[in-house]
Amino acid sequence: MNVLIADDHALFRDGVASLLRAWGMEVAGQASDGWEALEQARKLRPDLILMDIRMPKCSGLEATRLIKTEMPETKIVMVTVSADEEDLFEAIKSGAAGYILKNTSGEEFGRMLQSIAEGDAPLSSGMAAKILAEFARQDREAPTTDGPESELTEREREVLQQVVSGATNKEIAAALVISHNTVSYHMKNILSKLHLRNRAEAVAYALRTGLVSLNQEEQ
């Protein structure tokens, strides 16, 4: 995996770069602010960008929006000290594929990065719960028969329910007795049909529209 590290603290960037190289990943480059991250992304076309939120000149959130507009295939994961819900939700809306807090252990950080390669959306402990709690509190709109959700197959709905429950692709494959590649295929179809960019948006959409619910498995 080819990785770009964007953070305004050089010592942090160097530390993360050392970890990535030790895990066999390629560090394509580094950036100290949002504008530089955009320039480096254009030049290097990395597979993954680890993006801080608070940076001078251009924030990580703004840089994420700009990069995803030009390079939607590039995965961006926020790596930040902020556990603020507003930053979390704004990151998701901007197109971030994950949200990792800087107090995460090196071992857990490594597992999260590995999960990206498997198609999962890495979220630090508590962040996923905040997403689910926020959208569960919102008034759910009744799904309409002619909405995009009506295009989902029964199997795609089952996969989406598993995603909402917090399951990884590997766990979904085991639960539904299908292959990991099949899960990835269904996820791509779900995102395409619902016009969404990532798993976090899929969870938000499913809960907001009532397509699936948090307690559906218990019913």
Image (cartoon, grey):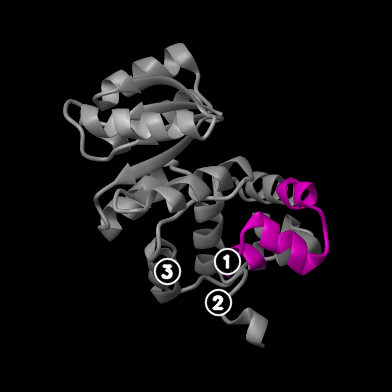
Residue at screen point 30% across, 22% down: 31
Residue at screen point 30% across, 30% down: 13
47 above or below 155? above
Indicate which disc, 3 or 2, sits on the residue closer to the N terminus: 3
Q: Is residue 189 visible?
A: yes
Q: Measuring from the top left, give residue 50's x and y in whole percent.
A: 39, 35
Indicate which disc, 3 or 1, sits on the residue closer to the N terminus: 3
Residue 169 magenta-highlighted: yes
Q: Is residue 188 left or right of residue 61?
A: right
| Element at label 3 | helix
Q: Which residue position is annotated with label 2?
A: 214
Residue at screen point 64% across, 45% down: 118
Q: CA distance from mark 1 to mark 2?
A: 7 Å
Indicate which disc, 1 or 2, sits on the residue closer to the N terminus: 1
Indicate the amino acid at tag 2: Leu
179 above or below 23? below
